């Protein structure tokens, strides 16, 4: 209950602050349909409300994908970013922009680069996320899913798809290069319309409900594959479907917002410190904390160098890198 209250408070605060400050009371009145000012109405409904909602949806999606990957791979370092899935999606987006021509320039100063076919971009990103997921599953089957093996596999996949993106950039023209660079900086303010937000929200909601419905299966897998099989859990099927859905969530978020790293790695571990490893509470808790963390990060990114707005991916990387190093050190100490 406290988490939802904190999320609501941060939601109102995020909408109220920025280059133009709007009192929280007026924000609430506007959201309730009581117009206070045409200027403020435009800022809230067209700019800040979609951005705040995108942060909540993306944070929840990345976090729940991370906690499920950590469970079904039995790897505390699993997440869409650390396992190279996000970079695979970014390569897919770059391939779509450069080879398939889904990126173009727009004359608007506020939004200089847009995707003229975001749905094709999403599909291509998903295909490459799925490819990276298949490689991860294959490696975990052949070599086991120890943290060392999975981290090395993730580093290799990240390097491979980053190199592929650089290769495409080398042959891109100015317009395509601008679109790819635009993708590199993950930012929740990138949504072009409410339909894109609806697609993201629908996919994330489906994933969260599916993962919650399978919470007992993930608890069994946490105890080991043999234990889970003895309890009647089809481990291979649960693992495959879980990774596919996590890849879909990652692909949709990457294709619409760009690469936002470390959220899926940090939030599950923060929640484990508070409530433990029980997936009945860990999955919804991580979903809620992911929404809060990315919303707070996006708000801070707008305020740090105001009136300039930093992409939120820069802030999450600064927070996530020390946490990633800490988890590696703690793992080796064990």
Image (tube, grey):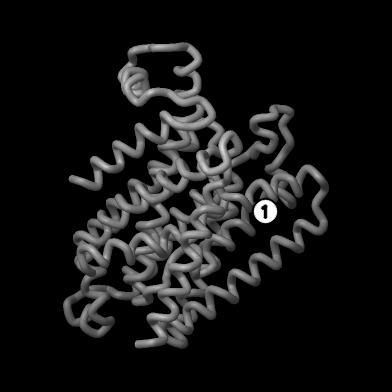
Instruction: Using residue 278 as the reference point, say whether residue 32 is left or right of it.
Output: right
Instruction: Using residue 156 as the reference point, say whether residue 171 is left or right of it.
Output: right
Q: Position of residue 82 (x, y in %)?
A: 50, 68
Q: In this view, does 53 lie above or below 280?
A: above
Quick one: quadrant of the N terminus? top left
Q: Where is residue 198 in the image (x, y as percent from the top left)?
A: 43, 36
Residue at image location 28% in from the left, 81% down from the top: 225
Q: Mark 1 points at which residue?
A: 94
Mark 1 falls on what kind of element? Answer: helix
Q: Position of residue 114 (x, y in %)?
A: 65, 37
In the image, 334 versus 141, the foreground residue is 334
Q: Where is residue 142 in the image (x, y as percent from the top left)?
A: 46, 86
Q: In this view, does 253 lie above or below 70?
A: above
Q: Which of the 4 image quadrants contains residue 87?
A: bottom right
Residue at image location 47% in from the left, 44% down from the top: 300
The answer to whether residue 279 of the structure is visible from this angle is yes
Q: Which of the 4 image quadrants contains residue 28?
A: top left
Q: How crowded is mark 1: few (under 14 residues within 10 Å), some or many (20 or more)?
A: many
In the image, 148 versus 164, the foreground residue is 148
Instruction: Using residue 211 as the reference point, say whether residue 248 is left or right of it.
Output: right
Instruction: Using residue 173 as the reference point, say whether residue 129 is left or right of it.
Output: left
The answer to whether residue 241 of the structure is visible from this angle is no
Count every numbered label the image shows and give the total: 1
């Amino acid at each position: 209950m406290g988490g939802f209250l904190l999320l609501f408070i941060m939601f109102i605060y995020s909408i109220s602050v920025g280059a133009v400050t709007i009192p929280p009371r007026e924000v609430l009145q506007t959201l309730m349909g009581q117009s206070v000012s045409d200027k403020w109405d435009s800022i809230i409904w067209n700019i800040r409300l979609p951005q705040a909602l995108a942060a909540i949806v993306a944070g929840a999606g990345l976090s729940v994908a991370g906690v499920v990957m950590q469970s079904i791979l039995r790897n505390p370092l699993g997440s869409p970013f650390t396992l190279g899935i996000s970079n695979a999606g970014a390569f897919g987006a770059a391939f779509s922009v450069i080879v398939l021509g889904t990126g173009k320039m727009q004359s608007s100063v506020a939004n200089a680069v847009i995707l003229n076919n975001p749905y094709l971009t999403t599909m291509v990103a998903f295909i490459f996320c799925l490819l990276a997921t298949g490689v991860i599953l294959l490696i975990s089957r052949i070599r086991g899913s120890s943290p060392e093996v999975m981290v090395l596999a993730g580093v290799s996949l990240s390097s491979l798809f980053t190199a592929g993106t650089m290769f495409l950039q080398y042959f891109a023209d100015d317009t395509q290069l601008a679109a790819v660079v635009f993708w590199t900086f993950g930012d929740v303010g990138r949504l072009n319309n409410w339909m894109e937000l609806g697609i993201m929200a629908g996919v994330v909601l489906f994933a969260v409900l599916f993962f919650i419905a399978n919470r007992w299966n993930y608890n069994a897998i946490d105890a080991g594959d043999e234990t889970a099989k003895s309890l009647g859990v089809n481990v291979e099927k649960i693992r495959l479907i879980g990774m596919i859905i996590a890849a879909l969530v990652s692909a949709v978020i990457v294709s619409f917002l760009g690469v936002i790293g470390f959220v899926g790695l940090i939030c599950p571990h923060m929640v484990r410190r508070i409530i433990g490893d029980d997936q009945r509470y860990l999955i919804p808790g991580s979903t809620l904390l992911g929404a809060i963390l990315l919303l707070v990060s996006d708000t801070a990114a707008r305020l740090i160098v105001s009136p300039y707005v930093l992409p939120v991916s820069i802030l999450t990387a600064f927070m996530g890198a020390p946490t990633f190093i800490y988890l590696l050190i703690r793992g080796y100490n064990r």
